[in-house]
Image (cartoon, rainbow, N blue to C red):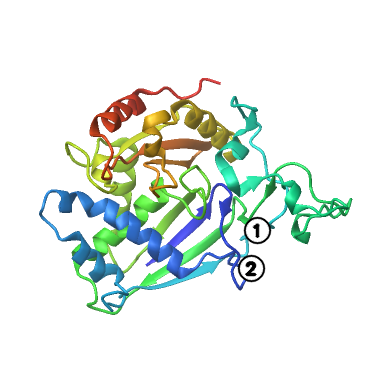
Amino acid sequence: MVLDLNVLSPAFVPGGPGRESAGIQASTVRDLLRWWYRALVGHEAVLGVTDVDLAETRLFGNSFQRVRCPLKIQVVPSRSFGVIPRGEEPPRTGVTVHVTPPQDALIYLAGSSVTPLSRGERDDQGKALDPAFDDPVTGKARRGPVLRQEAVTPGSRFAVHIGWKPGALDDRQIEDLVRSAASLVTLGGLGARSRKGFGALAGDLDALLIPEARAWWDSQTYGILHGPPLSAASGFPPFPCLAYAIVTSDPRLSPTWQQALGRLGRHYAAIRPRETAAWIAGSVRPKRESSLLFTLCREPGGYRGVATLIPSLPDGEHAEELGRYAASFKESPWPEE
């Protein structure tokens, strides 16, 4: 089967040996599909009906157990695939986030991926120690925020070919693989800061040899964006599960990805968990993934922001705190402007 994917917002990815791929490797796609697979079926482990570790190993392999992945994945960029070089000025959304100091929403969301050069990154003549950050006109280090790593440009397209040997997967595994891919494209993203609206994807599935695949893909996408939670689960799991997800969409359609990303930035600034609840949005020590995911979806006439809370309760955190935040997240209004 083939995923035909379109990048909706800049995707910060590491440079690879071939610049035309900008570091989008088959292993990266496999790891993303693995994460969304666990999120898709994880509630079955919570309910005690499935050994998710074993099921995941069968579908994606496990190097520690010396189990090879049965999937063969290939990433094929199209002619429209473009890259913004490292050191360039970042694009702007034109939407200001009112923090101190005020910032363009893209700069606010990008964090360390878009920052100005520090004094220690310049020599006595004002040139950047890394020539990639020099302005080609002045010959001196660029002023203001710059891209710290290259980014795939919005509008870039690439295909992901996924295959397996006949009989290697059963019907349930194939369905879960399709639904995991649909979840990735609908709620996820590619590259660094993908949980903050970068690397958002649009795409479709070509699987003519799997007649049921279209229905699986469409029902998963529709159910995520328009349906109730995937189950009536109560409490919070120890790892992200889609069955517990709360998904809200911007009521306003934006004509460009820049404006849609800008509105996401304002929304995030308003609902970002703070103080003792800051761990919900991720932390460095101890390292925890953010339970908040922001992305864009493309519709006829424009782009719409999507905010998702996939709550999980790591050891040492408080269910009451997460419960209060989940309730406020669901009711939080989107920006009016």
Q: Residues within 10 Å of mark 2 (few under 14, many from 20)?
A: some
State the residue at coordinates (57%, 62%).
Answer: 14
Q: Residue at x 22, y 54 (%)?
A: 41
Residue type, numbered disc 2 = Arg
Foreground of the two, 322 or 301 = 322
Amino acid under disc 1: Val
**Vertical relation: 144 (above or below) 206:** above
In the shown orientation, is residue 238 left or right of residue 281?
Answer: left
How many residues crowd around disc 1 within 10 Å: few (fewer than 14), some, or many (20 or more)?
Answer: many
Between residue 94 and residue 186, name the one nearer to us.
94
Q: Quadrant of residue 62?
A: bottom left
The numbered mark, 1 or 2, whose residue comes first in the sequence reads 2
Name the spot of residue 207 as percent of width and height, x first.
Answer: 35, 65
What x and y, as percent, mark residue 177?
30, 61
The picture places residue 168, in percent across and down from the top left corner, at 24, 76
Q: Locate the N terminus and report the quarter of the image it occupies.
A: bottom left
Q: Secondary structure at mark 1?
A: strand
The picture quadrant where one finds residue 310 is top left
Considering only vertical position in the picture, is 22 above or below 194? Answer: below
Q: Position of residue 337 (x, y in %)?
A: 56, 21
Task: Name the residue: 46% across, 45% down.
Answer: 195
Residue 116 seen in render: yes
**What residue is shown with label 1?**
83
Numbered mark located on residue 221 in the image: none
Q: Quadrant of residue 282?
A: top left
Q: Is residue 27 above or below residue 117?
A: below
Q: Which residue is mark 2?
A: 19
Marks 1 & 2, CB-CB < 8 Å contact? yes
